[in-house]
Amino acid sequence: MKKIIIPLFVIIIIFLFSCSSMNYLTIGVTEPAPVYLSKKIQTIGILDRSLPADKNSNINILDKILTAEGPNLDKDAAQKSVNGLFDELKSYNKFVDVKIINTEDFRTSGLGVFPTVLAWEQVDKVCKQNNVDAIFVLSYFDTDAKIEYSINPVQLKTPLGVVNTVETQASVFTYIKTGWRIYDPINKIICDEYSINRNVVTTGKGINPMKAAEAIIGRKEAVFNSSNDIGHEYATRILEKNIRVSREYFVRGTDNFKIGKRRAQAGNWDGAAELWEKELENPKMKIAGRACYNMAIINEINGNLDEALNWATKSFTDYNNKPALRYINTLKYRINKENQLQRNN
């Protein structure tokens, strides 16, 4: 029989994992939305401010020539972003109404950077004219593009037979840059200022560079789709997020920890906690500290964050359990986020 040789680093990894005193688990956590909107905001207006001002039109035209942009690409793609934001906000049933405000009264430099903040007098006027409580503003929208060519050998079938020739492949790299702001005229605050960028790559092939460039027929649609996705994505900044976080718990020290590990792996966390609780009075400080730590874990799993913090603190202060200090900071962060969630709701 052939002898199997296991590399040393694999043996070391297996040994470390088999001897680890802690196991991982993941739990679901709800985090507050990155952007908080006042409960008084019931109607939303969406404003596209990305059109370049007339005085900058020459710069914008030059930019389009240099970057091989199609006519009206930025304007039409910006509208796709606005539409995406509108559709997403409407789907939440969070607001009484969502409106797209069609106006060209507010222009930008057209250079892909945040323009000067709108004056509150302007914001108030727009909100009153359109009967909205706040406005989401597409502050800038810009696309930059470059074309790269490559030449590849190919064989073409002709009436005279197979001919060896070369084929040109053109790749257009379009970089979409967007900037968004949310104006709350009720509280006179800018709730958010955020940029979202995307890369869109399209390719075409032909017998010469011009034919290859002409073959890129999907670029406009690809830019439109990506722009629409940006609008949808930006809307999610006002939503709470459900994420999964990892934690560690002790599985070694006594038989109760070993059995508790198997119960936890089977999903019986309360059963595992019954065994951990028995070790709280263990005369060995190391074991009692681990039991306190695990009691913090079960309390976090059950949503008792303050009690979890108490157990983690006891594990560190009374028994010098080093992992507990990290866990204390983690729990404090979670409690802060939980309090923020309650304030927002």
Image (cartoon, rainbow, N blue to C red):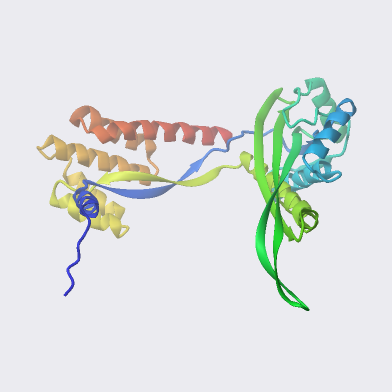
Question: What residue is drawn where x is 84% and y is 29%?
Answer: 59
Q: What is the x, y in percent for residue 199?
A: 66, 45
Camera-side residue of 72 and 246: 72
Camera-side residue of 153 and 21: 153
Camera-side residue of 14 and 240: 14
* Quadrant location of the N terminus in the rendered image: bottom left
- For residue 227, say whether it is visible: yes
Camera-side residue of 298 and 209: 209
Q: What is the x, y in percent for residue 174?
A: 71, 45
User: Can you say whether 195 is above or below 174 in the image?
Assistant: above
Answer left or right for 271 relative to 278: right
- For residue 89, say whether it is visible: no
Q: What is the x, y in percent for residue 335?
A: 43, 33
Question: What residue is drawn where x is 88% and y is 33%?
Answer: 104
The number of numbered discs placed on residues in the rendered structure image is 0
Quadrant hosting residue 194: top right
User: Can you say whether 182 is above or below 5 in the image?
Assistant: above
* Quadrant location of the C terminus in the rendered image: top right
